[in-house]
Image (tube, grey):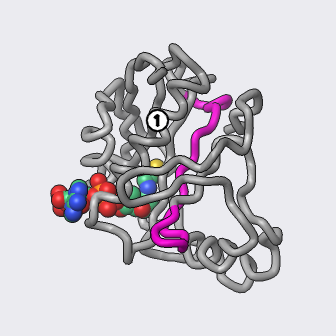
């Protein structure tokens, strides 16, 4: 995976009905530690990182790169959306495509925040990189993620075995830019 590189970054914060999507800031560091150390968040992502290692190694402003959105609810980070370039993807249909990932703190699950934030991030991408489809890979056992992918308009390209589990590769066709 590589960052989106060529897009103007950081963009103006994106506001939805309940959320703000923005680049990360120093004040997000503790929430990033919680997110990356959470066993629940990483059930289908190969396991969490040790909290002590994260406390030691995360930079002062974590995850500040083109395509990494912090999702902010009332001034506090509740999750991260990752829009990257799937440079090394093993599936030819996905290689080099824009790729969507999402991680939310468990306390923010079940409220529709992930769907609301991902839809806004995909809208931003349609303006920043017009005409590009977006791919998404998730474990098929990750039912919350599978439901979210369907809600966002991703449809199945293929299932494949990797990292000891069945993976679902989905694609979302290009959408017209908003403006
Ligand atoms: C995947 C993940 C982001 C899904 O989060 P989520 O909160 O379940 O997703 P959504 O935002 O779509 O919310 C869906 C739920 O909110 C409910 N909801 C409550 N209020 C709502 C509202 N106002 N609007 C919309 N939905 C609402 C919906 O009914 C739905 O419940 P259901 O799934 O039981 O049908 C979350 O589980 C997560 O971070 N997992 C760990 C990371 C991960 O595995 N990522 C995938 C790899 S890319």
162 in magenta = no
Left or right, 135 with respect to 22, comes to left
The residue sitting at 64% across, 45% down in the picture is 12
Left or right, 152 with respect to 179, comes to left
Q: Is residue 172 above or below residue 68?
A: above
x, y percentage for residue 4?
69, 33
**Residue 164: in sight, yes or no?**
no
The residue sitting at 51% across, 76% down in the picture is 38
x, y percentage for residue 100?
50, 40
In the rendered image, the quadrant that contains the N terminus is top right
**Which residue range is magenta in the image?**
72-90
Please name the residue that numbered disc 1 is placed on. Answer: 122
The residue sitting at 48% across, 76% down in the picture is 39
Q: Quadrant of ligand 1?
A: bottom left
Left or right, 121 with respect to 143, comes to right
74 in magenta = yes
Q: Is residue 144 above or below residue 155?
A: below
Q: Nearer the viewer, residue 157 or 76?
A: 76
Name the main secondary structure of what is drawn in magenta: strand
């Amino acid at each position: 995976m590589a960052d989106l590189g060529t897009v103007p970054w950081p963009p103006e914060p994106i506001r939805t009905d309940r959320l703000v999507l923005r680049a990360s800031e120093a004040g997000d560091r503790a929430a990033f530690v919680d997110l990356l150390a959470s066993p629940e968040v990483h059930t289908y992502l190969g396991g969490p990182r040790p909290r002590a290692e994260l406390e030691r190694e995360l930079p002062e402003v974590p995850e500040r790169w083109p395509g990494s959105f912090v999702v902010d609810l009332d001034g506090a980070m509740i999750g991260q959306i990752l829009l990257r370039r799937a440079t090394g993807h093993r599936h030819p249909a996905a290689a080099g495509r824009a790729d969507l990932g999402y991680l939310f703190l468990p306390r923010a699950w079940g409220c529709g925040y992930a769907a609301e934030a991902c839809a806004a991030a995909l809208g931003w991408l349609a303006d920043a990189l017009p005409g590009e489809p977006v791919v998404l890979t998730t474990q098929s056992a990750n039912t919350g993620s599978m439901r979210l992918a369907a809600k966002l308009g991703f449809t199945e390209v293929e299932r494949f075995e990797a990292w000891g589990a069945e993976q679902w590769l989905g694609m979302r066709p290009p959408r017209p830019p908003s403006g």
